[in-house]
Amino acid sequence: MKLHRRALKQGRVEIIPMIDTILILLIFYMSFSSFKVTEKRIDAQMPLLRKVSTGAVTKVPLDFTLHVYNKDRIVVNNGATPFDMDTLRDAMMTLASIGQEATVIIEAEPDTSYEDVIGALDACAQANLKKVAFRPIPGDQ
């Protein structure tokens, strides 16, 4: 007596349920992910060199150097008293209320976080100081 073998079923990969699952996962991850917030640009303009006429009353240019160590220690013009972000913002607002144009140069230590440097730049922007520049620190300091 000869035994008949059953025919083996061919396995099939169902692609449509896989596509549905991938689509649902994609929608899930996109809806719960936080999208990158783009940083707003603050324009910093370099001061221009102009000839001063001899007959006009000249204003003495104000140049300030902000040396940022961290958010709680910002030294202005190598002064003895360090500022924090709030007192720096108040000082910049006072400087802007005088009405005289000032040039602010921001320099930072190599290990200072970008957040602290941008905080100093924000203080200048809130005081509406337009002449702001960045200066690298020489390597021997």
Image (tube, rainbow, N blue to C red):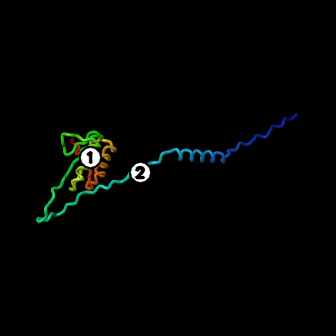
Q: Label 2 sits on what residue type?
A: Thr
Q: Which residue is mark 2?
A: 38
State the image coordinates of residue 97 (x, y, percent, origin top left): 24, 53
Q: Quadrant of the N terminus?
A: top right
Q: Nearer the viewer, residue 140 or 124?
A: 124
Q: Position of residue 110 (x, y in %)?
A: 28, 42
Q: CA distance from mark 1 to mark 2?
A: 27 Å
Is label 1 in a helix, a strand or a loop? Answer: helix
| Residue nearer the viewer, 91 or 72 | 91
Which residue sits at x=39%, y=50%? 39
Q: Is residue 50 above or below residue 120?
A: below
Residue lying at 18% horizontally and 53% vertically, measured from the top left: 62
Q: Residues within 10 Å of mark 1 (few under 14, many from 20)?
A: some
The image shows residue 112 at horizontal and vertical percentages of: 30, 41
Query: Would you name the residue on which mark 1 appears?
Result: 90
* Residue at image coords 14%, 60%: 58
Q: Secondary structure at mark 2?
A: loop
Q: Is residue 56 left or right of residue 20?
A: left
For the C terminus, give its image quadrant.
top left
